[in-house]
Image: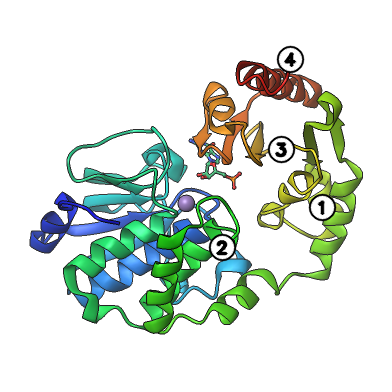
Amino acid sequence: MRRESIPLLDFLKETKGSILILTHENPDGDALGSAMGLYLFLKKQGKDVTVGCKDRVPHFLDFIPHSEEVISIPDGRFYDIGIIVDSAGFYRAGAEVKVAKRIRIDHHVGGEFYGRHDFIDPKAPATASLVYELISAWDESLIDAEIATCIYAGLATDTGFFRYSNTNEYTFELAKKLVSFGADPNYVYRMFAERESVNKMKLIAKVLETLTLYEDGLVAGITIFDRFFKETGTDYTDSEGLVNYPRSIEGVEVAFAMIEKPEEGVWKVSLRSKLNADVSKIAERLGGGGHKYASGCKIKANSYEEALDKLLSEIRKQLELQKILH
Ligand code: 5GP
Ligand code: MN
């Protein structure tokens, strides 16, 4: 992408302060890949840098180089600079941190803004591509195979391995560069997608039993009750990506997954659309956010039925607004 300048670049070059890089809770490949790529690069530049996350690195992302160095937050330490990646705001970290200055690197629409050092572009295919722009403008010669692998992991996972609508000429140009710096596409795919547990297959079987169609097949949803995790020996991280099953059905325009989180007293909702529906609008009205084709929110309700009703009525409203449903 062509850009005049990146104010964050000069700021980071000059700073001698301590830096905490944060991902959102339940990190995905783009969040962790972006954080670790930036972390490894800043370390090479001699900066005082740490990566923090509320949740443990999930198994499907533990191949990301040096991800074992991620610390658990809140950690009680004070940092001069906090940089949150792939998140609409610091609230997405899911824990309080003590930082003097807040910065956001992200590709979500809207969200919170902290000042001129934010580096936000909703047109970027992944937050990882913004991290690449930043570090390559600084010193491309420092991008080694590990840093390239982190960024490639972010780019590949957020584009559904180069299938989603954020896949374009630029995405492939960047992927090509990252491969030339040492990222291995087959390795990243195998590590991310082909290390599932048998228990996860049992979870999928249960979850698919809940598959329900609404609005004459325009909407499809699945539900992941907390007891499913207990019955199959899986956990929340095993719910990643399951929303792609309802989306894959012919004729479905909006797909959702409702995941029970009893410890927070909420239903975590993942929303996906295929062609026209803008699910970010649905998520925003329910207090969340995201992208046109992939977004999420949390719904607080007294019962499953109440949460489902709230969600379905917002989906219907959006489909009517966009004249997809008459
Ligand atoms: P997922 O469904 O995979 O959790 O998230 C899809 C997209 O929606 C991601 O870009 C994610 O950052 C965003 N998203 C998910 N949950 C929330 C939420 O609770 N609040 C906001 N603002 N965005 C969310
Ligand atoms: Mn992302």
Lower position in the chain sequence, tag 3 or tag 1: 1
- Please identify the quadrant where the N terminus is shown: bottom left
Q: Residue furthest front?
A: 169
- Is 290 on the left-hand or right-hand side of 107? right
| Residue on which disc 3 sits | 256
Lower position in the chain sequence, tag 1 or tag 2: 2
Gap in angstroms between the C-alphas marked 4 and 1: 41 Å
Q: Secondary structure at mark 2?
A: loop
Gap in angstroms between the C-alphas marked 3 and 1: 22 Å
- Is 321 on the left-hand or right-hand side of 291? right
Tally the numbered discs.
Answer: 4
Disc 3 beta carbon < 8 A from ligand 1? Answer: no
- Is 147 on the left-hand or right-hand side of 254? left
| Residue on which disc 1 sits | 230
Q: Secondary structure at mark 1?
A: helix
Q: Quadrant of residue 238?
A: bottom right
Q: Characterize the local packing of mark 4: few (<14), some (14-19) or many (20 or more) Cα atoms within 10 angstroms.
A: few
In contact (CB < 8 Å): disc 4 and disc 1 = no
- Please identify the quadrant where the C terminus is shown: top right
Q: Amino acid at mark 4?
A: His
| Residue on which disc 2 sits | 162
Whether residue 66 is visible to the viewer of this picture, yes or no, is: no
| Residue on which disc 4 sits | 326
Q: Residue shown at 78%/50% (left/top)?
A: 245
x, y (%) of residue 56?
A: 54, 60
The quarter of the picture showing ligand 1:
top right
Q: Amino acid at mark 1?
A: Lys
